[in-house]
Image (spheres, rainbow, N blue to C red):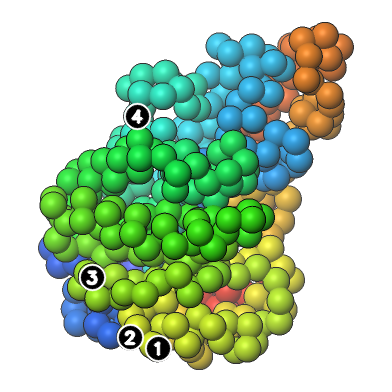
Amino acid sequence: MRYFYFQLLILCLWVGCSSPTSSPATKSFMRVEGVNLIDSTGNKFFIQGTNLGNWLNPEGYMFRFQQASSPTKINQMFCELVGPDFTAQFWSDFKDHYITEKDITFIASTGANTIRLPLHYKLFTEEDYMGLTHNQDGFQRIDQVIEWCRKEGLYLILEIHDAPGGQTGDNIDDSYGYPWLFESETSQALFCSIWQRIADYYKDEPLILGYELMNEPIAPYFDNMEELNQKLEPLYKRAVAAIRVVDSEHIILLGGAQWNGNFNPFTDASFDKQLMYTCHRYGGEPTSEAIASFIHFRDSVQLPMYMGEIGHNTEEWQEQFCSTLIAHNIGYTFWPYKKMDGSCFTAITAPTNWSLIVDFAESPRATFDEVRKARPNQKEAQKVLQEFIENCKWENCKIQEGYIRSLLLNNKLH
């Protein structure tokens, strides 16, 4: 079956039956024209694709963890389980094998035209992250994805999923339970500096569709939520200004407050000529009414709207919602591309005795005594983690054909 998909992809490249939207082969950047995106050939471009979640910003639920829910908590748990040196090697192997050229080739074969790449800000600092305490490899990892995408004609959206201090205040931004980014001048300065570095590094790369400044800012849990919301647009303006010092071409994407769902905090859509907005939606009815506020805001500012995350639902729901999004000119990238279990493009099979890891992750570990009592045999735990690395490789994952069909991509699985 896998051989069939590769042969089909090769055939499509020869006979020209792939997506009619242009590939980012020429030195011309994607641009905004009213509510549409315009590609290098002057044609309207409609985003369809997926997110490379969990690769460079691990999330506990994708490993079946509940308590170890954020990158920091996962790393702490692994260190307690198998030690810091084995954990560092695990992260190195994880980054090398979780996403490879084979994954990008397969994504292109489904008819997708865009990949959203979630990133942790620590990938661009000297802070301890995913096994490295210096010489972080953020740019190297992105460079590799760009080369793979270039071969397949895919666009790439770079997105800071975990901002300095935390922009959300929950596990998804690897924070400390509050969006400290909006309270800290130090974190804001670092945030803008990182984006300026990224923009300067990629200012001449047309394959990058745009820069998404931050993911799902300001969770709806806080008594001062409205006060925090008022700080969102000013910080966006500051970051955009920092980017424009070095890069005048790339589109910049702005997400709404409260899980990218509330656009009321935005009062000025004219401060930059290359802006678009991005919303998220999980659950609810797959109808126009469910996204009415997004459509209204898009039409009021006359700028593109894009559904950066959607998914974790039945195939019937996803197909209906994709039809709704297509009808209303809202492109989409489904979350995520790969994880353990289904509801993704390719599913990772749980290693034998994976419960050994999960049980430790969920056990009480507040004291060193509790850690020692909960820890299983290290050799067995190491073997299970090594098996995970093997299982996460593209050739060992299970393709979710029905899931992919439900996304209504311009593909050959229909």
* Residue mark closest to the camera, 2 vs 3: 3
Q: Earlier in the sequence, mark 4 or mark 2?
A: 4
Residue matched to label 4? 125
Q: In the rendering, at what x and y percent does residue 32 appear?
A: 25, 77
Real-space CA distance between mark 2 and mark 3, rounded to the nearest whole angstrom: 13 Å
* Amino acid type at mark 1: Asp
How packed mark 1 is, by other alpha carbons closer than 10 Å (few <14, some 14-19, many 20 or more), is some
Mark 1 sits on what residue? 299
Are there few (<14), some (14-19), or many (20+) residues within 10 Å of tag 3?
Answer: few
Q: Secondary structure at mark 1?
A: helix
Camera sees residue 264: yes
- Which residue does the numbered mark 3 point to in the structure image? 271
Q: Which mark is residue 405?
A: none
- Badge 2 amino acid: Gln
Nearer-the-camera pick, 183 or 135: 183
Q: Which mark is residue 302?
A: 2
Residue 109, visible in the rendered structure: no
Question: Real-space Cα distance between discs 1 and 4?
Answer: 39 Å
Q: Residue at x 31, y 74 (%)?
A: 268
Q: CA distance from mark 1 to mark 2?
A: 5 Å
Q: Count residues near mark 2 (Cα–Cα under 10 Å), then give few for <14, some for 14-19, many for 20+.
A: some
**195 with respect to 1 (left or right):** left
Q: Earlier in the sequence, mark 2 or mark 3?
A: 3
Query: How far apart, in angstroms, are the residues tagged by discs 1 and 3?
Result: 17 Å
x and y percentages locating residue 164 in the rendered image? 43, 39
Q: Is residue 224 above or below residue 24?
A: above
